[in-house]
Amino acid sequence: MLQCERESTDVIVTMENGDRYVAAFFAYKYIEMIRQLNFQSGEFIKGKYFWVKNMVLVDSCCREDILNVIENIIEEGNFESVFEKL
């Protein structure tokens, strides 16, 4: 398993006009790891739920994969629904 498949990261996109946007990217396998940890710790009602503002779930948090996802989000016209302006 690649390290990128077990990570999360905040992604900041800077537009040509200088505006900056943020979203939290989580690899699916990372979410499962967090769910297990929350079950053990009791957080989030023992892992029954999890949320993060502006969350994007991805196969991998590797740079190339994130760039592809961002391009697709922009192409689909969903950028401002997914990313929060800073």
Image: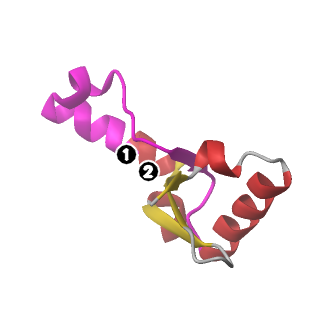
The residue located at (73%, 45%) in the rendering is: 78
Q: What count of labels does the image hold?
A: 2
Q: Amino acid at mark 1?
A: Met
What is the x, y in percent for residue 4? 52, 67
58 within the magenta span: yes
Residues in magenta? 33-62
The residue located at (57%, 47%) in the rendering is: 56
Instruction: Answer few, some or many: residues within 10 Å of disc 2's Cα (few below 14, many 20 plus, some between 14 and 19).
Output: many
On-image quarter of the N terminus: bottom right
Q: Residue furthest front?
A: 17
Give above or below for 30 relative to 71.
Answer: above
Label 2 secondary element = helix
42 with respect to 16 (left or right): left
Marks 1 and 2 close (CB-CB < 8 Å): yes
**Disc 1: which residue:** 33
Q: Amino acid at mark 2?
A: Tyr
75 with respect to 16 (left or right): right
